[in-house]
Image: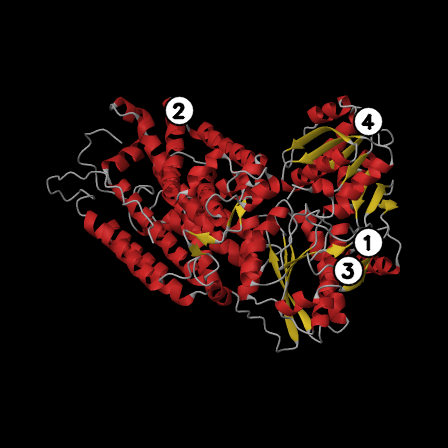
Amino acid sequence: MSFAFPAPVRIRPTARPQRKASPLTRFSTRALALPAAALAVALGVAGCGARTSDDPADAGTAASASCVDTSGDTVKIGFLNSLSGTMAISEQTVRDSLDLAAEEINADGGVLGKQLEIVAEDGASEPSVFAEKAEKLISSDCVAAVFGGWTSSSRKAMLPVFEAKDSLLFYPVQYEGLEASPNIFYTGATTNQQILPGMEYLKEQGKSKIFLVGSDYVFPRTANKEIVAWAGANDVEIVGEEYAPLGHTDFATIVNKLKGSGADAVFNTLNGDSNVAFFKEYKNVGLAAETLPVVSVSIAEEEVGGIGIDNIVGQLTAWNYYQTVESPENETFVAAFKAKFGEDRVTSDPMEAAYTSLYLWKGMVEKAESFEVAAIQEAADGVTFEAPEGTVTVNGDNHHIAKTALIGKIGPDGLIYTEWSSDGPIEPDPFLEGYDWAEGLS
Amino acid sequence: MSPRVRFWGGLAIAAALLFGVAPALLSDFRLNLLAKFCCLAMVAVGIGLAWGRGGMLVLGQGVFFGLGGYIMAMHLKLSDAGPGGVPDFMLLYGDGTVPGWWEPFRDPVVTVLAILVLPALVATLLGLAVFKRRVRGAYFAILSQALAAAFAILLVGQQKVTGGTNGLNGFQSFFGFTLSDPVNKRMLYFIAAGVLLLMVLTVRLIMGSRYGELLVAVRDQENRVRFLGYDPAVVKTVAYAVAACFAAIGGALFTPVVGIISPADVGVVPSIAFLVGVAIGGRATLLGPVLGAIGVSWAETSLSESFPSFWIYFQGALFILVVAFLPNGLATVGRFFRRRRAEPADPVAPEPEPALETSGKAS
């Protein structure tokens, strides 16, 4: 190994007359000897582990010796969501529905007869903290599976940890696709279950000039790249593509560009506070949902109140679940959620996907009759659950789930009502392999 | 106890803890966390020099931390991709080709040199430009913070070449050693701990030298130093560059230890967090910044594990207590009591020996 360290700088190397007060002269040799010796000993003791050329199997077994304890009458699972920082307001709602699901499952006798014991952690809205806490949950708490994450960056940060430790993550939020890890189950929508149906709906409505506006991060940029490729093959013109930094609140320029672009519809991937400013500005310049509709993919029931119902009523959203979905499963879910957390609370797509993810894990474990990762991966294909959004089925190849796409319209009461739905669940296709126009995207 | 005995005693204890006790007692996971804290402490050592001794309120160390971290991350991504290969995220989000300015970082030697030199060079140029114009105090703080904000926005916007908000992650190996192997993680910890001790020694050398005395003089009376014929801008720039170099090394080791570097690790908030640790530990002392940075990070981790929903309030309370009762940091707690007992001492002068010689150019 050859790690070169800079030697401590000797400010005055020249010899000086012996003088008590010079801190330098009495310094040099001892100063270097201690840490140098310590470092040498340490590196000697540490030795060197596997190099990349070594047999990977050895390194693998050393890293992934699972410590999950299933001998008692409980089994540990981890919930990892941001409870502080900018994402806390969204992720707390996901944590609430995970808690609800765990409570229901425990009341119903647990999983394989074992009660769920929750280890809760705060991801603090920072990817590196998500990675740290994921490792803590797997290595120190020995959980059987982890549920959580929201932003793409948090998922990307956790992915190497789950792969290296060979553990399982259930990720409940719609995302930009182009990923399929054997150690992650994606229970939110991938692009062909949310974004493409949104575009196809607009095309069906006769819209042919689309303006793209989004926050400047991975999800909007990747989604828009796919939309541009889709538009090229569908005779739809993209008349503008604008990004605002996350948290940006001055939309005068972007809305003016939008107004002047001749667009007949907007596809909106803005996130968080930016939506408030965008829709206010949109209304200020005299635009209206009837003539220039906006399809949003990051605005759910939870966000409508914050944006202001007046600013956004009549606009469209693309998701796989709304609180207003009519099914007995959803009625039970909404009633249970309101009973636990309050009548004024609403349920949204990511919350439903998180709730569903816990039941899907339960289904996989029961099918595998084991909490072991390999057995669950083996058993995952075809596991179904009658979710509030409808029947969902796990795809064993890419670990996503088949979901029905729903285009909704925001009503005057702040809830979202289904305008259009796909013909049954859409098979997940994270790499868009089934679409000719998507060739070369990934 | 003389300051010298205290220093060597403290260092010996620190070395024994870092190299003996910690590896023996901590699990691999905890040891890796300690390695991360050591990386953050490296930034703190630099801030202790620039802020504590030099009086420059460096609110943008995230920039240099990020430069080091991203340079290392680029090398790790390229070496994972193999000779001539393209990192995975570029295939997903970019056009599948490696930009020209990435290419030099395929070479490990260039990478290490770049980590050591590039951030220090940036800091030197910036420092000369700013300090020559006598920009000081709050203006300098605002400027350095704006720089951190701009750097993070730049990284986010250039998703095709920097990974955007996701940052760079998913490293397989570190200079040929597989990162998933716990033994190699241990090695990384020892490297981080060793480098941290070397940095503390370097700062000790600087603090004890005539340059160190000049730096304190510039902090306390910049104009008098100028009238004596020194150029305070050069004196400050050197400390700023050293702090930048330390931050870059911290970032470079943070990347393989944590496994990710993203704009969230380099922007305004982490830049302030670096400063908070230093302030709590004691900015003008030698070991204060290190203890502060490690202590604050450790408290953050353990509090958030025990109280995931409201740990942040505990942390806030801790900050208020320290600032209210120990404005010079936890490292001065001993002095606080001694001062009560005996005669008052200058709280920011740990080296009472007078400078006997003041000739020679600084830097």
Residue at 33% in and 57% down: B14
Give how far apart the Cα atoms at labels 4 and 3 are: 41 Å
User: In the rendering, which numbered label is found on residue A425?
Assistant: 1
Mark found first going from the N terminus, 4 or 1: 4
Q: Chain of mark 3?
A: A
Looking at the image, which is closer to me, B104 or A44? B104
Residue of label 2 = B129
Q: Amino acid at mark 3?
A: Thr
> Marks 1 and 3: in contact by CB < 8 Å?
yes
> Marks 3 and 2: in contact by CB < 8 Å?
no
Give how far apart the Cα atoms at labels 3 and 1 are: 9 Å
Give how far apart the Cα atoms at labels 1 and 2 are: 61 Å
Residue of label 3 = A393
Q: Amino acid at mark 1?
A: Pro
Disc 4 and disc 2 on one polypeptide chain:
no
Locate residue A426 relative to residue B278 in the image: left or right. right
